[in-house]
Amino acid sequence: MSDVLVIGGGVMGAATACFLARDHGARVTVLERDPSYAQASSSLSLSSIRQQFSQPANIALSRWSLAFLRRAADELATPDDRPALGLVEPGYLYLATEAGAATLRAVHATQRAEGVDVALLDPAALAARFAWLAVDDLALGSLGLSGEGWFDGPALHRAFRRKAQACGVRFVAAEAVGFHTQGERISHVRCADGSTHAGDAVVLAGGAWSAPLGAALGVTLPVHAKKRDVFVLETPAELPGCPLVIDPSGFWFRPEGRLLLAGGPPRGDDADDLPLHAIDHGLFDERLWPVLAARVPALQALRVRSAWAGYYEMNAFDHNGLAGRLPGWANGYTACGFSGHGMQQSPAVGHSLARLVAGLDAPLIEPLAPQRLRDGRPLREANVI
């Protein structure tokens, strides 16, 4: 197998590098501009996994990834480490008023056709199952009965990196800024420190910062860094059986041990690259807390313990990942723009992209091929949180 350069050492790049080396014997070098991963989406992700998508392609990717996460202790074991990812599967619960009920039913039909273990619950059934939930304004809820939940995302990222290194992958601290090309092939990656790295194939996995790399190759990647705030809440309330709940307002919450995590759509400005340290506490005070108190009356007594922010690598074209060969390049590939579901789909995408780079079929990611950008064929995902 040839030499492969992966630009970006976050979970998507690390997974791709891991599978390339482990399964295909590739000699892989990962170029990462910030080895601390302080602002990487991989470090700041909520790390949840679901099958309640509107697109069959996303359902298939998350189903494959879930099966991988369940056996990750074996898949990613090294001589001195067996990763523990803390995977739990309490489900997702999408709530809808009458205005959103028809959409929920339509998406449910798609999910059931794909074999997703999901149930539609009317208000009475919701109240019977979740006594702490206010249902008076609701028409319907969609509950994942299995195969949905959350896990330790940073632990998955570390496990992919350790397994990759155990398989011979080199991680190099360097910021890719350009390329040397010959015809339709990329021959070298040029870095900010003046160094160059040769490769027979190049994978762009720069997350929210992938667009400039694509532009350097004449490829428009409509991927932008969108800040999302997450609030850590303390409350004496007990919410037995609580899944990850998505309110009709777009706000969400889920348990994390004895705490709650919550967040939702930004207030006002949704510009690109907003600083992560500037938490919008007004979002909680003015919008999120009133929604939580109305939906779960027991949450009227709570306080914000802490908060953090991370970037969605948002694909403005259709809110779906871009994974596959770069248009116009024989040996250029990308995995970026997953719009909030990259962590959960990283095992499936990394495995599939590694197969593609190795010259094999990769049906799981065919619908995500970047060629759809040039063809004007959006694959729109309706269920973006």
Image (spheres, rainbow, N blue to C red):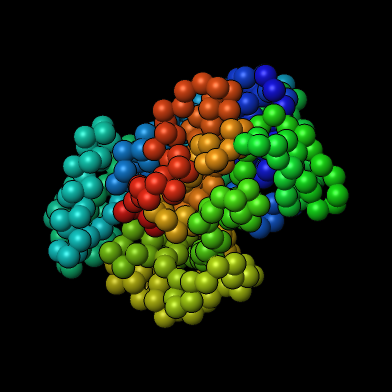
- The residue lying toward the viewer, choosing from 34 and 337, is 337
Q: Residue at x 15, y 56 (%)?
A: 102
Res 356 seen here: yes
Left or right: 376 as drawn, with respect to 96? right
Q: Position of residue 62 (x, y in %)?
A: 41, 37
Rendered image quadrant of residue 236: bottom left
Please give left or right for residue 299 compared with residue 348 in the image. Answer: left
Q: Is residue 218 left or right of residue 269?
A: right
* Residue 137 horizontal/vertical position (percent): 18, 68
How many marks do you count on the picture?
0
Residue in the foreground of this view, choosing between 327 and 318: 327
**Front in this rendered view, residue 275 or 324:** 324
Residue 43 location in percent, x, y?
A: 62, 51
Is 231 rendered above or below residue 167? below
Residue 101's x, y, as percent?
Answer: 17, 58
What residue is rendered at 42% in x and 67% in y? 265
**Residue 140, relative to residue 364: is it above or below?**
below
